[in-house]
Image (spheres, helix red, strand yellow):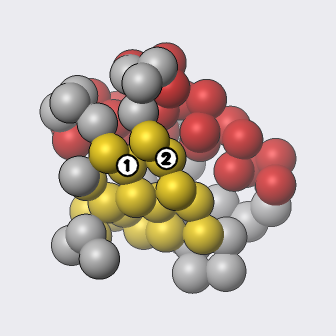
Amino acid sequence: MTAFDIPDMTCGHCKSTVENAIRSVDDQAKVRINLTTKTVDVKTDASTEDIAAAITAAGYTPGLRAPL
Ligand SMILES: [Cu+2]
């Protein structure tokens, strides 16, 4: 489990962009996005660094957060 704050994720479009970015690293990833708190929880075997890099490449700014 890895988790991020993504403050610049603001709408449904952002949500699907971030979700697709994560899935491009691990298509089996379990992704839970909360637009209200602007947080993402990812259950994946991929490394946190790879997931963060994909989110960054999609144009967003992920900050590491302790998983809930
Ligand atoms: Cu948006």
Q: Residue at x 28, y 36 (%)?
A: 44
* Distance in Å between CA atoms under marks 2 and 1: 5 Å
Q: Residue at x 42, y 68 (%)?
A: 5
Q: Residue at x 46, y 20 (%)?
A: 27
Mark 1 CB near ligand 1 (8 Å cut): no
Mark 2 CB near ligand 1 (8 Å cut): no
Residue nearest the observer in this picture, 14 or 29: 29
**Image check: 49 left or right of 9?**
left
Element marked by disc 2? strand
Q: Which residue is mark 2?
A: 31
Asked if labels 1 and 2 touch by Cβ distance under 8 angstroms, the answer is yes
Q: Which residue is mark 1?
A: 42
**Image check: 57 left or right of 51?**
right
Residue nearest the observer in this picture, 61 or 49: 49
Element marked by disc 1? strand
**Image check: 36 left or right of 29?**
right
Image quarter where the C terminus lies is bottom left
